[in-house]
Image: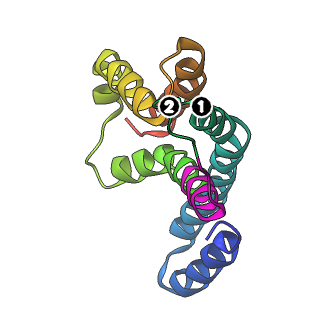
Amino acid sequence: LVVIFPYAIYEIWKFIRPALYKREQRNVRGAFIFGTMLFFLGCAVGYCVVFPLTFRFLTQYQVSGAIANTISLNSYMTNFITIVFVMGLVFEIPILAWLLSVIGVLKKAFLKEYRKIAVVALLALAALITPSGDPFTLSIVFLPLFLLYEVSILVVKE
């Protein structure tokens, strides 16, 4: 899915483009380009940051000395693909926020008003994503999520 993502976006664009006005075409084209860049940035964060931390924790974690950790190629690849793809999707949050603001569901004032609650929710999400309990790993996962929230505030219309 990660490899064919740009081609799939291009095919979707070719399909919906004839039905859009020129102004709508500009907005949708910009959203597709920005969304593709965010997706690949999220995949890069998942690949370079989140997956190594997760894998290191899972290889060092041991229930007891009598039970050995066994990592199969299937479990390794499943974890790798899941983490990279989910991080790519998580980085699409600003595009989703922009889309919700365009259709009138989400307002910038709402995001600003509930920023403190969002920080707590993002910390909880980062704690769920990170398998270890150390603050360093938690902050490494939390910071991109918080920055995505702030970017969402910037892209949402008044």
Kindly identify the residue that appears in the image at 41 percent across and 54 percent down. 99
- Tag nearer the camera, 2 or 1: 1
Q: Residue at x 49, y 77 (%)?
A: 20
Instruction: Tell me if label 2 and label 1 are in contact, CB under 8 Å.
Output: yes
Q: Which residue is mark 1?
A: 57
Query: Amino acid type of disc 2?
Result: Thr
Quadrant location, the C terminus? top left
Does residue 73 belong to the magenta stretch? yes
Q: Tell me the distance, in whole angstroms, between the alpha carbons under discs 2 and 1.
A: 9 Å
Dominant secondary structure of the magenta stretch?
helix
Q: Amino acid at mark 1?
A: Phe
Secondary structure of the residue carrying numbered label 2: loop
User: In the displayed structure, does residue 24 sit left or right of residue 56?
Assistant: left
- Which residue was labeled with disc 2? 130
Q: Which mark is residue 139?
A: none
Q: The magenta stretch spans which residues?
A: 70-83
Residue at 28%, 28% (x, y): give it: 110
